[in-house]
């Protein structure tokens, strides 16, 4: 700024300083007015509220100037008194100008965070000014929050809130609405993918954990409104209205905000609990999955395998699904006191794709059908984990069924007087090997059913039956339950990258050897009953059975060694169960194992 002094008049240095300070008011006014217009181009309700609040300050400036002009006629104003009178206005304009500069191109929560950071200022005048400004600026934000937690609606066209619609998911739903697969998993997609949580837009005056509670509360209410029945929504809305009609959410009452959010969350969580556990009977569905897909109902699985065993021994191409379904329905009715129509309709047989050499055992599957809103919990991913566990337990049950048949053949052969005494010695040796296999398969079956499934179920049941958890916690508890089943039940080691399923592969090799040994038992028994016995056939059967017995022992030793090295204590304990009598240790010491096994044991 340059000063032009009239002739005969000198502007002193103190006067110049006073004039400069007073001139700053005009400079700040023009700058604020210009930046406000630029800021409006960014768009957004919060930005508009911010600019409107700053323009209110400019209006206040006009009133101050008008007040000063009214006093000019009194000839009582000096530069010092004028500056003293305008100092509060100057401070507010300086703050406003600074805020406009540092909030350029900021919207929503980011803009709020910048403003909120100035509430930590030590000057009480600055603190009060920023607090009053935030009270006005946050009106659109609190309107969005109010609609979210009371109505489950996200009214945020400019995406200024920390929750937003997942536009990709909306597009996918429109494109695939008519696809049957999309409809089956629709509830889970709506819950999991309809909205997004944007951490970078969370205001600094609420912590991240509380923001996630707000997200979960509104999502639960939205889910009740659009995925459950009209009655469920009306009951929820009535409970929420009793609170919402009495309160107004605003920035100056953060404690009240937390209280009301907690109340809304409690109402939504209780309603979700009531819908899923009382109306939809979620626990009964989960128990049905445990009993039938996880084969926990002993009488059912025994009858099913006994009925289907002969058919499943045939090539997969010769099986018909309607025959298997009929057998399944009969097994359900015979092993349940009062089987519901719903259970019979949901439980079905599924045939996997097969190759020419596959047997019925390899392609047979049970499946459990679900619909919205149950598929939020029993989603496609969750059902895939149930299928994995079914395949694992089904293989164990098949081997158990086959080796029991082998045991019966050997017992019948030992008591058959028509069989040569020399062959009965082979029967006796085979019984010893089969008893080893029976011990292995029963210990593994007992581990999966008791240590894995039943213990996991008790932990899951005690978690989900706590009234007060939201739907997210219910989904997470079910996910943890299934992950535990898959990890322990399939003998996985997630810490061993690239070799996570080493123990599972060894167990499956044991299964293959047991099935091969059963085939050898059939060959031995057929030879013993044959009227025309070929030369060398018995020696070939003996060599094959001896090799298979030794191979099985080696594999069990390798499996025990691998289980011992597992980080999971339950899997390490399985190795103790398999070798509780140190049978395999004595076998190794006697030199009955291969060098590879001995090396692994060391």
Image (cartoon, rainbow, N blue to C red):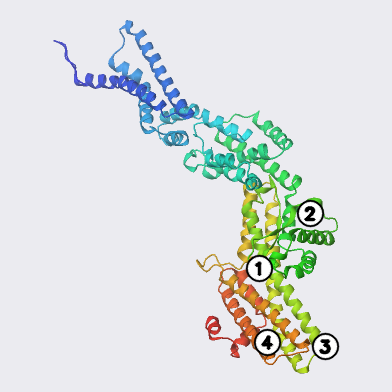
Residue 185 x %, y %: 64, 47
Residue toward you, 582 or 100: 582
Element type at mark 1: loop
First in residue order: circle 4 vs circle 2: 2
Residue 416 x %, y %: 82, 88
Disc 2 crowd, CA 10 A, few/some/many (<14, 14-19, 20+): some
Measure the C-alpha gap from mark 1 to mark 2.
28 Å
From the image, tell me which residue sits under label 4: 541
Comparing marks 4 and 2, which lies closer to the viewer?
A: 4
Disc 1 crowd, CA 10 A, few/some/many (<14, 14-19, 20+): some
Q: Tell me whether the residue at label 4 lies in contact with that at label 3, contact meaning CB atoms closer than 8 angstroms.
A: no
Residue 410 image-quadrant placement: bottom right
Residue 148 x %, y %: 59, 35
Label at residue 248: none
Residue toward you, 528 or 248: 528
Q: Tell me whether the residue at label 1 lies in contact with that at label 4, contact meaning CB atoms closer than 8 angstroms.
A: no
Disc 3 crowd, CA 10 A, few/some/many (<14, 14-19, 20+): few
From the image, tell me which residue sits under label 2: 344
Measure the C-alpha gap from mark 3 to mark 1.
34 Å
Q: Residue at coordinates 35% horizontally, 17% vertically from top-left?
A: 85
Measure the C-alpha gap from mark 3 to mark 2.
44 Å
Measure the C-alpha gap from mark 4 to mark 3.
20 Å
Measure the C-alpha gap from mark 4 to mark 2.
46 Å
């Amino acid at each position: 700024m340059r000063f032009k002094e009239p002739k005969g008049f000198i502007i002193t240095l103190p006067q110049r300083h006073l004039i400069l300070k007073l001139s700053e008011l005009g400079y700040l006014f023009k700058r604020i007015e210009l930046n406000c217009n630029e800021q409006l181009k960014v768009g957004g309700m919060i930005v508009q509220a911010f600019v409107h609040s700053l323009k209110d300050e400019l209006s206040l400036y006009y009133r101050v100037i008008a007040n000063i002009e009214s006093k000019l006629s009194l000839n009582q104003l000096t530069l010092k008194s004028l500056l003293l009178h305008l100092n509060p206005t100057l401070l507010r304009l300086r703050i406003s100008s600074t805020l406009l500069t540092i909030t350029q191109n900021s919207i929503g929560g980011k803009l709020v965070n910048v403003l909120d950071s100035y509430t930590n200022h030590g000057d009480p005048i600055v603190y009060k000014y920023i607090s009053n400004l935030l009270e006005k600026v946050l009106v659109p934000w609190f309107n969005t929050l109010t609609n979210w937690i009371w109505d489950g609606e996200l009214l945020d066209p400019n995406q200024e809130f920390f929750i937003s619609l997942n536009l990709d998911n909306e597009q996918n739903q429109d494109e695939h609405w008519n696809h049957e697969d999309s409809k089956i998993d629709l509830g889970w997609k709506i819950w999991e993918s309809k909205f997004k949580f944007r951490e970078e837009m969370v205001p600094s005056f609420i912590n991240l954990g509380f923001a996630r509670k707000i997200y979960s509360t509104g999502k639960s209410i939205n889910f009740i409104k659009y995925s459950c029945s009209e009655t469920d929504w009306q009951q929820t809305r009535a409970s929420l209205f009793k609170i919402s009609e009495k309160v107004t959410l605003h920035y100056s009452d953060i404690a009240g905000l937390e209280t009301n959010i907690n109340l809304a969350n409690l109402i939504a969580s209780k309603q979700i609990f009531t819908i899923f556990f009382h109306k939809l009977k979620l626990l009964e569905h989960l128990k049905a999955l445990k009993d039938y897909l996880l084969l926990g109902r002993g009488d059912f699985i025994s009858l099913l395998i006994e009925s289907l065993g002969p058919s499943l021994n045939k090539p997969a191409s010769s099986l018909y699904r309607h025959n298997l379904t009929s057998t399944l329905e009969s097994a359900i009715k015979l092993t349940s006191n009062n089987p519901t129509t719903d259970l019979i309709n949901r439980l079905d047989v599924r045939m996997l794709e097969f190759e020419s050499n596959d047997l019925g055992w390899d392609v047979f599957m049970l499946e459990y059908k679900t619909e919205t809103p149950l598929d939020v919990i029993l989603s496609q991913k969750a059902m895939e984990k149930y299928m994995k566990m079914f395949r694992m337990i089904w293989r164990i049950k098949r081997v158990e069924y086959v080796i029991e048949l082998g045991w019966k053949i050997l017992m019948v052969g030992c008591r058959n007087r028509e069989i040569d005494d020399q062959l009965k010695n082979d029967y006796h040796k085979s019984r010893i090997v089969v008893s080893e296999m029976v011990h292995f398969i029963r210990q593994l079956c007992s581990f999966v059913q008791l240590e894995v499934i039943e213990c996991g179920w008790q932990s899951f049941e005690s978690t989900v039956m706590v009234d007060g958890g939201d739907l997210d916690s219910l989904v997470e508890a079910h996910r943890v339950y299934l992950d535990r089943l898959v990890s322990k039940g399939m003998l996985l080691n997630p810490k061993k990258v690239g070799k996570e399923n080493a123990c599972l592969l060894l167990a499956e090799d044991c299964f293959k050897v047991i099935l091969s040994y059963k085939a050898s038992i059939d060959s031995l028994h057929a030879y013993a009953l044959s009227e025309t016995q070929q030369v060398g056939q018995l020696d070939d059967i003996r060599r094959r059975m001896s090799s298979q017995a030794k191979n099985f022992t080696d594999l069990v030793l390798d499996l025990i060694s691998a289980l011992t090295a597992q980080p999971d204590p339950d899997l390490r304990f399985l190795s103790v169960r398999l070798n509780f009598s140190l049978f395999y240790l004595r076998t190794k010491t006697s030199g009955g194992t291969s060098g590879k096994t001995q090396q692994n044991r060391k």
